[in-house]
Amino acid sequence: MNHTPRFRTVLSCTLLVVSFGAGATACGDSGDNPLSAEPYDAAGQIAFSAPSGSKKANPDKPLEVTSKGGGGRITDVTATDTSGRYLAGELTADGSRWRSTAPLAAGTRYTVHVATEDDDGAPGSRTLSFDTQAPKGKKLLTVEFGPEAGKYGVGQPVTAKLSAPVKAKADRAAVERSLKVRSSPAAQGAWHWVDSKTLHFRPKEFWPANGTVTATSTLQGVKVGALYGGPVKPLKLSTGDRVEAVADAGSHYMTVYRNGEEIKSIPVTTGKPGFSTRNGIKVILGKEQFVRMRGTSVGIAAGSSESYDLPVYWATRVTWSGEYVHAAPWSVGSQGSANVSHGCVGMSTENAKWFFGAVRQGDIVRVVNSEGHTMENFGNGFGDWNLSWDKWRGGSVLTAGVKEGSGPVGAARLRPEV
């Protein structure tokens, strides 16, 4: 399709206005310029594959728009559904046919705008609306966002749990495009596939402090493999101050920061040799004022020299396997000077109570200079932040291998969705 003649007409008009000023009329409407005419009704020139009347279209079949000939051609087609999703398609070079290249969504209504022109360049238009059939006898793919609505620290990832595994690259891309996460203030972020049924979303940096995060879905009706997307409940979170605790196993002190400023330094003890505390960034999973801690729960045989069974207070959990920041009055003599715990960060009862009250779920605990391995990325809490941003983006079908700030059409949409 060559629109060169029209483009030159408009351009010359612009130049004349600039050269001659507001009073110039050389490019005024002469009455015979096709561009100035109201679009004619192209109903007799266009044919649709969609059914008419009350019948509904089969979403498994593509949508086709064709020109009936007779001196006209299609110049553009825009098809959107009630969720605002655009239907991708291709127009032939001669403007005789447009065909959708992506599956139609099921159980929705489409509005199709078609632009045409005749041999003289006069514009025509035609608008069509039709409904698609709802999925019949098909299992729906649903998504549950997490965590529960509420207020969290800036390290809390957004999770998406699928009702069925999704493995094919094209199907994962369809899921990712349908799951939207936005924050205010805005931040750049991406999804990461943890496994075939679980995705996590995090920003490049931590979430903005004292902001909001929303997760929504346009998955309903979208074809994903043999399934169609079902309804998804949206999620809204808020964030508090940026609270980060840095536990240094080498100096035996933990420093707590709020919005970048130090608010307290606490003498601690961390894991002794053989039970070294995990290094890296952990996200607070919850708080328990009292918990009974037993060595058997972490694989220590009852009756061994390392066995323990203790009442523990002011316990802030950072791994599912049992790593906490908690009161350890029995080790006060070693706090600030030696590592004697079985992997937890221990402190005095007074300091543990203060820490318990100063943090919330989603806040950050970072351990440095420990002999332990790095916190697991997934499966034992949220070690998401221990992945570099490049590796995190590599876990997304839409951003893997795409240079940041560039990429194919559609990639740019990822950034504002955070």
Image: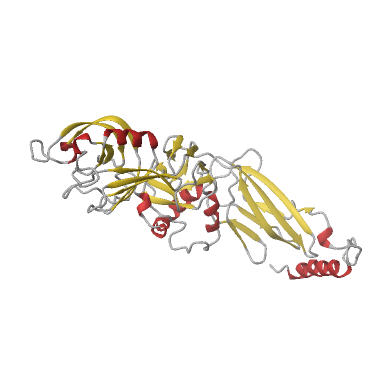
Q: Nearer the viewer, residue 83 or 367?
A: 367
The picture places residue 401, in percent across and down from the top left corner, at: 43, 63
Q: Nearer the viewer, residue 160 or 51?
A: 160
Residue 360 in view, yes or no: no
Q: Residue at x 67, y 66 (%)?
A: 94
Q: Quadrant of residue 314?
A: top left
The picture places residue 85, in percent across and down from the top left corner, at: 58, 48
Q: Does residue 414 appear left or right of residue 336 in this picture?
A: right
The picture places residue 285, in percent across and down from the top left corner, at: 34, 39
Q: Residue at x 46, y 58 (%)?
A: 399
The picture places residue 67, in percent across and down from the top left corner, at: 69, 58
Q: Residue at x 55, y 60 (%)?
A: 409
Q: Does residue 244 appear left or right of residue 34 in this picture?
A: left
Q: Report the label total.
A: 0
Which of the image's four quarters has the N terminus? Answer: bottom right
Q: Is residue 109 above or below residue 392?
A: above
Q: Does residue 123 appear left or right of residue 93 in this picture?
A: right
Asked which colour scheme the image uses, the reply is secondary structure
Residue 415 in view, yes or no: yes
Q: Quadrant of residue 160?
A: top left
Q: Nearer the viewer, residue 246 or 19?
A: 246
Q: Nearer the viewer, residue 302 or 350?
A: 350
